[in-house]
Amino acid sequence: MAEKRIAQYKQIENDLLQQINLGYYKKDDLIPTELELSNTYHVSRVTVRKATDNLVAKGLLTRVAGVGTFVCHPAVTLNPSSIQGFSQTMIEQGITVRTEVPTFMLQNAPANIASILGIAPGEPIYYIERIRYANDEIFQAETTYMSSRLYPDISIQILQKSKYQYFEQAKGLKIAYSHHTVTPLHPSKRIATLFGISLDTPILRVANTTYLTNGQVMDYTELTLNSPKYQLTYEKK
């Protein structure tokens, strides 16, 4: 089967998005004019306008009549070099957070998940889905697996707040580190609808295993980031 070719406007949109997120264009910077972009990409100004319209609709660009198109703000960044959860990351940037928990149930651990969690296959675990909002926009979807034997008092009320804060402050269990595996991908139909993006918008999925200082695995979580709004960065030290 021939590889599906990405639409020209979507290529321009993705390139501009990447340049904004990489800091090539910063907040309040003017991006190139429609004429300049049409010459660069050898497309019509209508095609360029479709790309920038999408970024305006996403709140990343704004137009000022007679002046040009400006960057409103870059995507918020997640920096896994520090051990803190979504809530604390957002709060430190002055962003209001809330969490919905559409799924919270018990199931028997599949062999691969049991291996990650360090428990026996078939042992009961929590299966949790959370939707994380920042300033009432969806930034992240999570699927979490956690041992119900080791952590029997987890509840929806706890999951609507910060897991990290609960483990460290309420349980007195210190988080040692998290191991991340990052995969770029295109969203599923469900995720595209949830995030309000097209099926050919590149996003990131982070497989995150969090370890406590007592040697136990706290949880295994797959984070799907709404990458036009929420970017992953790393800082080496």
Image (tube, rainbow, N blue to C red):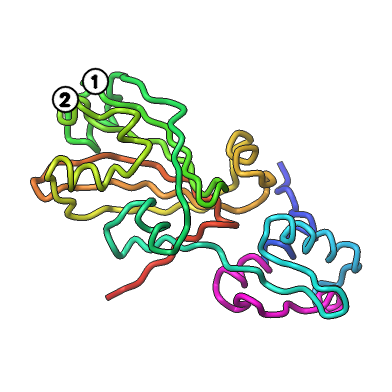
User: Does the magenta segment cover residue 227?
Assistant: no
Residue at 86% over, 72% down: 42
Q: Is residue 26 left or right of residue 32?
A: left
Q: Please provide percent x and percent y for residue 36.
A: 83, 80
Q: Which mark is residue 149?
A: 2
Q: Position of residue 38 (x, y in %)?
A: 85, 73
Q: Is residue 153 above or below residue 54?
A: above
Quadrant hosting residue 90: bottom left
Location of the N terminus (image quadrant): top right
Amino acid type assigned to the residue bearing label 2 in the image: Arg
Q: Which residues are magenta?
A: 16-39
The numbered disc on residue 30 is: none
Going 83% across and 80% down the picture, which residue do you hit?
A: 67
Q: x and y percent of residue 60 in the render?
A: 66, 63
Q: Nearer the viewer, residue 167 or 14?
A: 167
Which residue is found at the position 46% from the left and 28% from the top?
102
Question: Measuring 27% from the left and 76% from the top, which residue is drawn there?
Answer: 237
Task: Say if mark 2 contacts mark 1, CB within 8 Å.
Answer: yes
State the separation of the CA atoms marked 2 and 1.
7 Å
Q: Is residue 52 left or right of residue 81?
A: right
SS type, badge 1: strand
Q: Amino acid at mark 1?
A: Pro
**Label 2: which secondary element:** loop
- Is 1 situated left or right of 204 in this image? right
Residue bearing the label numbered 1: 124
- Which of marks 1 and 2 precedes in the sequence? 1
Along the line of sight, the residue nearer the viewer: 25 or 2: 25
Task: State the residue in front, 116 or 100.
Answer: 100
